[in-house]
Image: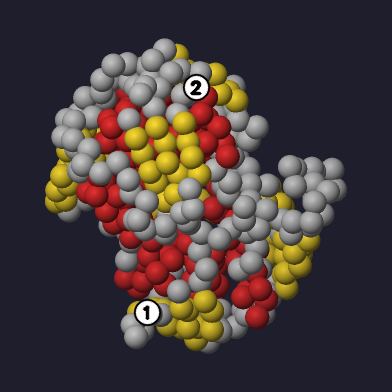
């Protein structure tokens, strides 16, 4: 029986130095899928070497892509679709459903597995399915898969009750080669989506985005060509390294990151009483515990990102007073706080929205609000990761804690972070993989 890897971390050492964030895994995986829309070669630079990319590459190669990787440059060419069904492939992430549009355009049929991904709450695909139906796809829910057919897709007007990132990406990938115009109302406008739009436009797509009104217009074209594109930097990685440094009284320089990716995070860093300096080639972050209590709501971009709250909550255990995180994107994303409580954190999770602040979970029984009381001393412990971002919170807590922590379930964090243990060690962390 295979023994799963673990991380052993001895906490209490400040993280000091500089680190260059890799390309965004959330953007890179979508750019790789977008390459299926053309027979011509697509060159994608700054691809992260994470497990998420391996899973996406497996999907594309299975349907017929020839892929060559040289360092962080990936060249993909899909001359023909050899397999329209990828239903037996990995369910470890939510990428396969995004292949429906490209596969329909190239072969008229698509079959993808029921989605996997991190257990962070109900993540329905109804927005995806309804949008694809409006575009003319006929979709059948089978026991373990979704089967779709369409002779050709037609433009449509699509309204999202909530600005879903995945569903917006799905419409973009499906509508660029559809007949006529598609209008998306209340679209997600995350930077990773703009990276995908940039690629599609360079391939010949006709897309206009009004970020203020969340309106996207797509005029279908008859064909798309090859492209050369670079993956944007991973803002989740940047935030993860910054929170780890601040939680350990460290001083870190994040290379090749721009303030436009981190505005709402930097506002909260300042509110904590920590510091940042925008310098040539990146941003420096530093601070000293205890910090000031902070309250925040997670929400779609440009607000504070839901993927940032887990490591940031660890920081709040080192702040004086009561902090509140109101999670409005996913209804079940505070399961990791039980591990932090065992490490000494004082956290109460509630289903009641903060006074005067209501969200789509208001009046329901979802524990989507965390009250954090501090500062508290964290102690090392044995922890099991359950998803990517919670796993990063566990690592940050272990780095800040007194004593030794042993963390299992490392495959989760490996899906989203490249060589995280080695890169933390270069910043002074006492961390090893066993």
Classed neighbour count for the residue bearing mark 2: other residues with Cα under 10 Å, few (<14), some (14–19), many (≥20): many
- Side of 395 relative to 253 (left or right): right
Identify the residue at horizontal 68%, vertical 47% (top origin).
Answer: 328
* Relative to 46, residue 425 above or below: below
Identify the residue at horizontal 71%, vertical 52% (top origin).
Answer: 326
Q: How is the image coloured?
A: secondary structure
The quadrant in which residue 258 appears is top left
Q: Mark 2 or mark 1: which comes first in sequence? A: 1
Report the label total.
2
For label 1, the residue is 5
Q: What is the quadrant of the N terminus in the image?
A: bottom left
Frontmost residue, 424 versus 36: 36
* Relative to 340, residue 146 above or below: above
Q: Position of residue 51 (x, y in %)?
A: 33, 60
Identify the residue at horizontal 48%, vertical 56% (top origin).
Answer: 117
Q: Secondary structure at mark 1?
A: loop
The quadrant in which residue 40 appears is top left
Q: Secondary structure at mark 2?
A: strand
Kindly give the residue lying farthest to the top in the view shown.
180
Q: Position of residue 16 (x, y in %)?
A: 41, 67
- Side of 391 relative to 28 (left or right): right
- Side of 181 relative to 107 (left or right): right
Q: Please say whether residue 27 is visible from this viewpoint.
A: no
Q: CA distance from mark 2 to mark 1?
A: 44 Å
């Amino acid at each position: 029986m295979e023994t799963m890897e673990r991380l052993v971390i001895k906490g209490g050492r400040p993280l000091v130095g500089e680190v260059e964030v890799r390309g965004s895994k959330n953007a890179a995986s979508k750019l790789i899928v977008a390459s299926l829309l053309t027979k011509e070669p697509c060159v994608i630079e700054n691809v992260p070497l994470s497990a998420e990319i391996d899973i996406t590459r497996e999907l594309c190669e299975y349907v017929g892509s020839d892929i060559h990787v040289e360092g962080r440059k990936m060249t993909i060419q899909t001359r023909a679709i050899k397999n329209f069904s990828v239903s037996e492939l990995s369910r470890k992430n939510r990428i396969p459903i995004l292949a429906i549009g490209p596969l329909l355009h190239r072969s008229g049929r698509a079959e993808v597995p029921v989605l996997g991904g991190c257990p962070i709450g109900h993540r329905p695909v109804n927005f995806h399915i309804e949008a694809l139906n409006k575009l003319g796809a006929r979709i059948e829910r089978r026991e373990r898969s979704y089967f779709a057919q369409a002779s050709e897709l037609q433009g449509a007007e699509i309204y999202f009750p909530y600005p879903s990132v995945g569903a917006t990406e799905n419409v973009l990938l499906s509508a660029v080669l559809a007949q006529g115009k598609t209008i998306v109302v209340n679209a997600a406008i995350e930077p990773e989506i703009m990276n995908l739009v940039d690629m599609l436009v360079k391939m010949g797509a006709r897309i206009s985005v009004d970020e203020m009104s969340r309106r996207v217009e797509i005029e279908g074209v008859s064909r798309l060509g090859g492209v050369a594109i670079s993956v944007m930097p991973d803002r989740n990685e940047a935030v993860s390294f910054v929170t780890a440094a601040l939680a350990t009284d460290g001083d870190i320089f994040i290379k090749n990151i721009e303030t436009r990716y981190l505005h709402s995070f930097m506002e909260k860093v300042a509110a904590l009483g920590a510091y940042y300096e925008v310098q040539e080639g990146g941003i420096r972050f530093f601070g000293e515990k205890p910090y000031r209590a902070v309250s925040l709501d997670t929400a779609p971009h440009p607000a504070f990102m839901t993927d940032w709250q887990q490591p940031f909550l660890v920081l709040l255990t080192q702040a004086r007073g009561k902090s509140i995180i109101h999670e409005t994107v996913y209804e079940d994303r505070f399961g990791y706080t039980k591990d932090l409580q065992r490490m000494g954190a004082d956290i109460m999770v509630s289903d009641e929205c903060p006074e005067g602040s209501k969200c789509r979970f208001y009046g329901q029984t979802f524990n989507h609000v965390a009250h954090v009381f501090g500062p508290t001393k964290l102690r090392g412990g044995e922890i099991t990761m359950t998803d990517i971002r919670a796993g990063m919170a566990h690592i940050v807590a272990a780095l800040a804690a007194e004593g030794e922590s042993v963390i299992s379930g490392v495959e989760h964090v490996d899906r989203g972070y490249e060589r995280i243990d080695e890169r933390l060690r270069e910043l002074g962390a006492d961390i090893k993989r066993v």
